[in-house]
Image (cartoon, helix red, strand yellow):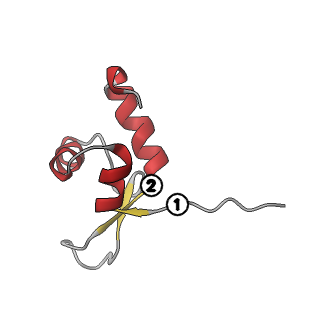
Amino acid sequence: MGEQRTLWLSTPELCTQLKVSRSSLRRWVHSGLLREGQHWVRMNPCCPRSDQLWQPERCAVQINRQRPHCRR
């Protein structure tokens, strides 16, 4: 059967795709709206300051749930 691959984007790529700023992403992570392991992962799990990779579909769904007036 066909296997679905998950698309992962870098932070700049996600910001461009969702038309949001880095500070908005950071705020949503700190507030718990976007969760590690569900919406994003660290490129290097051993380094707490590592760059992040994001699942754009999951992020968009979660953001739109919180902000329905901003649907794209």
Q: Residue at x 30, y 52 (%)?
A: 15
SS under mark 2: loop
Q: Is residue 57 above or below residue 54?
A: above
Query: What amino acid is found at the position of numbered circle 1 in the picture?
Result: Leu
Tell me the CA gap for discs 1 and 2: 6 Å
Residue 11 visible in the snapshot: no
Q: Residue 68 appears at what percent x and percent y?
A: 36, 22
Q: Residue at x 20, y 48 (%)?
A: 21
Q: Which residue is mark 2?
A: 55
Q: Nearer the viewer, residue 30 or 25?
A: 25
Q: Residue at x 33, y 26 (%)?
A: 70
Name the mark on residue 56.
Answer: none
SS under mark 1: loop
- Is residue 31 shown left or right of residue 12? left
Q: Which residue is mark 1?
A: 7
Residue 36 visible in the snapshot: yes
Q: In the picture, which quadrant includes the C terminus?
A: top left
Q: In the picture, which quadrant includes the N terminus?
A: bottom right
Q: Is residue 7 above or below residue 49?
A: above
